Every structure is written in structure tokens, then in C-alpha cells.
Amino acid sequence: MTYRIALMIAAVVLLGTWTSDNARATGETAAAALKFVDGSDAGSIKLTQTPAGALLKIDLKGLKPGPHGLQVHKVGKCDGNFASAGPIYNPLAAKHGFLNDEGPMAGDLPNVYAAADGTVVAEMLSPSLHVDESGGDSLFDADGASLVLFEKADDYKSGPEGAAGARIACGVLKNR
């Protein structure tokens, strides 16, 4: 009898933990208008909070066909060559890359693929990103966050940015 009571208590505690950790403000959104280094329009990325993380809807243009690294960076600034965006968003001090035993960083995202006409239309889910402001892990801290697009594919293992080459487009995330 004591064993059953202990199991029931454990189940309630686990359910309560799951509910509080996952009771995010579903539906909150953020967006970034990406610009190339020359200031021309590269498209947009919209993030929507879901119980499973942030859903990204990507609509880009003007890219060289093929794969491009995409990452969330720690600072909400996109000046000059976009070094102002800082390093990859990494609140848990992980290592870069999906193929790294000590990774990935929260800001690591899968590569996006530009079609022959230079466009990208894609969706992806990132369980590590949160756009609502209710938790300490929100992207909207004091210095914000940005999305950075790279000239080549992220190899998912090399530090600090996956050997993806130059930062070619950047957009500051804004709460909507």
C-alpha cells in the first residue's frame, strides 16, 4: 500500500513539473527582418511559441543556391559585417553542433537550403528556443537576440560557427 501511494505522489510531482515547465505562453510570436551586408532585403523569419519550443517559419530570397547555416545569436544587433550579433545563443554553455557530444547550443539550427531561384521557404521546430518572456530562458533578455545566416552550410561540429563561412544576412528578433 505504501508503495502505491509513493508512486501516485511521484506521478503527481512529475506531472506538476511537466505542466509548469511546459506551460509557456503558446502563440506568442517574434520576427526578424533579415538584411544582407549591403542593406538589401533578405526576407524574414517568424517564431511562434508552442508547448514544444519555437516554431520558425522561414521566407528568404536572394541567396546563392544550396545550403546555408542559420543560427540564433546572443545579441540583438546587426551592424557592419554582423559581428555585432555576438556568438551563438548558448545559455547552457554547450559546445557548437548537433554532431558534438557536448552540444548543441540553444541557438544551433539546421541548415536551410536555397532553391535554384535563391529562395528558401521552410519551417523548423527548435525545442531550445523560447520567445515568450515568462521564463528566464527567453530570447528577450537585456541585449536581445538576432538570427544570422551564413554563406555556406554549417558542418554541425566545428567551433565556433560550424565552418559556415561569412555572415551574409542578419535580423534582430523583435517581439510582436
Image (cartoon, rainbow, N blue to C red):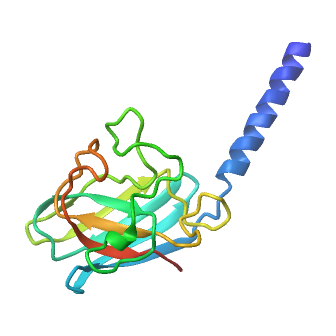
Q: Residue farthest to the bottom?
A: 39
Q: Is residue 32 found left or right of 16 in the rendered image?
A: left
Q: Residue lying farthest left?
A: 116
Total number of numbered discs in the rendering:
0
| Residue that appears at 39% across and 65% down | 86
Position of residue 171 measured from the top left corner of the image (x, y, whole percent):
36, 76
Residue at image coords 41%, 70%:
146
Judge whether 138 appears above or below 168 on screen. Answer: above
| Image-based side of 139 in relation to 19, left or right | left
Which quadrant would the N terminus be assigned to in this image?
top right
Residue 70 sits above or below residue 30 on the image: above
Say which of 72 and 61 sits in front: 72
Question: In the displayed image of the protein, which residue is found farthest to the right?
Answer: 1
**What percent of the width, then of the height, locates residue 78?**
35, 77
Image point 26% across, 49% down: which residue? 162
Does residue 82 lie above or below 74 as drawn?
below
Q: Is residue 128 left or right of residue 96?
A: right
Residue 77 figure quarter: bottom left
The one nearer the camera, 64 or 100, is 100
Q: Position of residue 121 (x, y in %)?
A: 26, 67
The image shows residue 75 at horizontal and vertical percentages of 45, 69
Q: Is residue 152 above or below residue 77?
A: above
